[in-house]
C-alpha cells in the first residue's frame, strides 16, 4: 500500500507525461484501482487464512475439475437436483443456463462466452464490467425445481476459542420463486448442504445455514440432520440486482452475527457493514472446525419467470455473482482431495409454454445427466467409479464424500425401513451401512425427497496408490425411482508435520501438474 500511495503522489505531481494531465489522471485512476485490488488481496481480513479474489482469471486447464473455471485445489463444486432426481430416465439432470434476460445483471462475462451455457460452462471467472469493476465469479444454476450449485472451500475454517470471520461479496437481490443464495458452515465436508423448507434438503449432519432470501436473513441450526429455525429477527437487507454487497458472518460456538453493506456501484468500493441479525445458539455448536459452502439456488425460474419475475418469457437459470471470498483464523492444511467427474450424459427435455398470450412455444432443452444410477439387491453393485492419481503419502484418514439419493416407499410415504447402503473399494469385501437415526428422521420430515450428504470413513488399507475404484449398491431400498450417487470426492487427511506443494495432488511433480488431465 505504501508504494502504491507513493506512486499516486508521483502521478499527481506529473505534468510533462505524454498526453499531459489527462494521461496523468488516467494513470492515477489505474493506480488507485491497483491499490483497491491490493487491499482486496487479503479479502479485508487482518489474518486471512483463505482468500480468493479471482484476479488471476480462470484456473489453468491442469487445475480444473467439476468447477469448470474454478481451481479444483481450492474449491469442490457440486450440482444438485433434489426434485425427482432420477425420474424420466435421467440422473441429476441439468439443462442450459443463459445470460441477459434480466436487464439489471452484468453483461455476459467475457467476449468468448456466448449463447446458452451447459453445466460444463456454468461457473465462469468474468472480466470486469461497469457494475463489478474487478474479476468476479458468475455461477448459473440451470436445475429447475429447487436445484443448487454449491462451492465448498477445500480448506477447513477453524473458529475454536474465538469468533471467526467469513467474508464474501455477492449479489443479494433475490426472488423466493426464482432464486437466492445461502452459505453453510458444516462440520463435515458436505457436498450439497441445503435447507429443508424450499430447498428440499439434503441437510448437513451438523452445521449453520444462513439464507439470503429477499429482505430478511434466515438462520438455521442443524444438529444430527434436524434443522431448527433460530428465533431471531432480521433487519431489511439492502440489495440491487447485478451489484455486489459485502457480507460478513461472525461465528463462534455460541453466537452468529450477520452483517452486510449497501450495494456497491462498482464492486470495489463498499459502504460500512451494518448488523442485520444476531443469534445465540441454545446450546453451543458441537464443532469448532468446519467447511464453508457458498450456494446458489434456483427455485423454479422457468415456471415463475413470467408471472412472478415480470419477464417477457420463461427464464432458464438463476445467475449469482461472487467476489473476494475469504475467512480468517489459523492457516490449516487442506485435505488432499480427488474427485470423480460428473457423468455428463446428454439428454433433452421439451417444454410447451404459451408466451405471449396466444402464442405456443415448443422448446427442446439440451442438458446433461450428472449422476450415476446404482442397483438395489443382495450382491448388486454398480459400475466402478474412479478416483484417478491418488497419493496416499503420509495419509492419516480417508473419507468418501458424496450425495446419495434413495427413495424407499412404505404405506405412508418415503421410508428407509431395513434399507442399507453398500459400497466397495478396489475389490475388497463390500461395506454395508445402516442409516443413522438422524438420517432416518431427516427423510421422514416433510419436504424431503430422498437426498443425503454422506461423509464416510474409508479404511486406508483398502486404498492404493494411483487409481482407486469405488462401487455402490443398496439393499431393500426400491421404488419407482432408481437410486443414485453424484458429486463424489475422496478426502485424505495428512500428517501436519509434512508440507506438500499443494493439498490436492501431492504425488504429482510440478511438471506433471502443468499438464492437462485426460
Image (cartoon, helix red, strand yellow):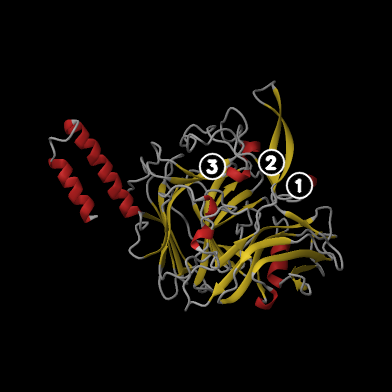
Whether residues under marks 2 and 1 lie with C-beta atoms below 8 angstroms apart, the answer is yes
**Residue 132 as seen in the image, left or right of residue 295:** left
Q: Which residue corresponds to mark 1? A: 90
Foreground residue, 49 or 418? 49
Element under label 2?
strand
Residue 253: where, in percent of width, then height? 47, 72
Residue at 48%, 34% in the rendered image: 111
Where is mark 2, residue-wise? 367
- Place residue 489 in its image quadrant: bottom right
Is the residue marked by circle 3 packed among few (<14), some (14-19), or many (20+) residues within 10 Å? Answer: many
Q: Earlier in the sequence, mark 2 or mark 1?
A: 1
CA separation in Å, label 3 and label 1: 24 Å
Q: Which residue is mark 3?
A: 319
Name which of mark 3 and mark 2 comes first in the sequence.
Answer: 3
Vertical order, 265 against 81 (above or below): above
Residue drawn at point x = 27 percent, y = 41 percent: 30
Outermost top residue:
358
Amino acid at each position: 500500500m505504501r508504494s502504491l500511495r507513493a506512486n499516486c503522489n508521483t502521478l499527481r505531481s506529473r505534468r510533462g507525461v505524454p498526453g499531459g494531465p489527462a494521461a496523468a489522471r488516467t494513470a492515477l485512476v489505474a493506480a488507485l484501482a491497483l491499490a483497491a485490488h491490493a487491499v482486496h488481496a487479503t479479502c479485508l481480513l487482518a489474518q486471512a487464512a483463505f482468500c480468493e479474489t479471482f484476479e488471476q482469471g480462470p484456473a489453468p486447464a491442469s487445475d480444473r475439475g467439476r468447477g469448470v473455471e474454478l481451481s479444483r485445489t481450492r474449491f469442490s463444486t457440486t450440482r444438485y437436483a433434489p426434485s425427482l432426481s432420477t425420474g424420466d430416465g435421467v440422473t441429476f439432470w441439468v439443462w442450459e443456463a443463459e445470460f441477459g434476460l434480466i436487464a439489471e445483471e452484468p453483461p455476459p462475462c467475457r467476449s468468448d462466452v456466448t449463447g446458452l451455457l451447459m453445466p460444463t460452462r456454468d461457473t465462469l471467472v468474468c472480466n470486469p464490467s461497469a457494475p463489478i469493476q474487478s474479476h468476479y465469479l458468475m455461477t448459473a444454476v440451470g436445475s429447475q425445481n429447487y436445484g443448487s450449485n454449491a462451492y465448498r472451500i477445500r480448506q477447513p475454517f477453524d473458529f475454536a476459542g474465538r469468533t471467526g470471520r467469513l467474508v464474501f461479496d455477492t449479489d443479494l437481490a433475490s426472488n423466493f420463486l426464482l432464486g437466492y443464495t445461502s452459505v453453510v458452515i458444516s462440520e463435515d465436508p458436505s457436498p450439497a448442504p441445503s435447507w429443508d423448507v424450499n430447498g428440499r434438503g439434503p441437510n448437513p449432519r451438523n452445521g449453520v445455514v444462513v439464507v439470503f432470501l429477499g429482505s430478511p436473513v434466515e438462520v438455521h441450526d442443524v444438529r444430527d440432520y434436524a434443522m431448527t429455525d433460530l428465533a431471531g429477527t432480521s433487519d431489511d437487507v439492502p440489495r440491487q440486482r447485478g451489484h455486489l454487497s459485502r457480507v460478513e458472518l461472525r461465528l463462534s460456538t455460541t453466537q452468529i452475527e450477520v452483517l452486510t453493506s449497501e450495494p456497491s456501484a462498482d464492486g470495489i468500493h463498499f459502504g460500512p457493514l451494518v448488523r442485520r441479525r444476531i443469534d445465540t445458539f441454545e446450546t453451543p455448536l458441537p464443532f469448532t472446525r468446519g467447511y464453508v459452502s457458498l450456494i446458489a439456488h434456483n427455485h423454479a425460474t422457468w415456471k415463475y419467470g413470467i408471472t412472478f419475475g415480470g419477464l417477457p418469457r420463461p427464464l432458464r437459470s438463476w445467475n449469482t455473482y461472487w467476489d473476494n471470498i475469504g475467512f480468517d483464523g489459523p492457516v490449516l492444511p487442506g485435505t488432499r482431495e480427488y474427485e470423480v467427474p460428473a457423468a455428463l450424459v446428454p439428454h433433452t427435455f421439451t417444454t410447451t409454454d404459451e408466451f405471449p398470450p396466444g402464442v405456443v412455444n415448443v422448446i427442446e432443452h439440451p442438458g446433461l445427466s450428472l449422476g450415476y444410477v446404482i442397483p438395489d439387491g443382495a450382491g448388486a453393485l454398480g459400475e466402478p467409479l474412479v478416483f484417478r492419481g491418488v497419493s496416499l503419502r503420509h495419509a492419516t484418514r480417508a473419507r468418501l464424500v458424496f450425495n446419495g439419493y434413495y427413495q424407499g416407499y412404505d404405506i405412508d410415504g418415503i421410508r428407509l425401513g431395513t434399507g442399507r447402503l453398500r459400497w466397495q473399494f478396489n475389490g475388497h469385501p463390500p461395506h454395508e451401512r445402516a442409516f443413522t437415526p438422524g438420517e432416518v428422521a431427516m427423510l421422514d420430515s416433510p419436504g424431503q425427497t430422498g437426498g443425503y450428504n454422506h461423509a464416510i470413513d474409508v479404511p486406508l488399507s483398502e486404498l492404493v496408490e494411483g487409481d482407486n475404484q469405488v462401487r455402490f449398491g443398496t439393499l431393500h431400498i426400491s421404488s419407482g425411482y432408481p437410486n443414485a450417487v453424484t458429486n463424489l470426492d475422496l478426502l485424505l487427511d495428512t500428517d501436519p508435520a509434512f508440507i506438500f506443494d499443494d493439498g490436492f495432488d501431492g504425488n504429482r511433480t510440478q511438471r506433471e501438474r502443468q499438464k492437462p488431465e485426460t
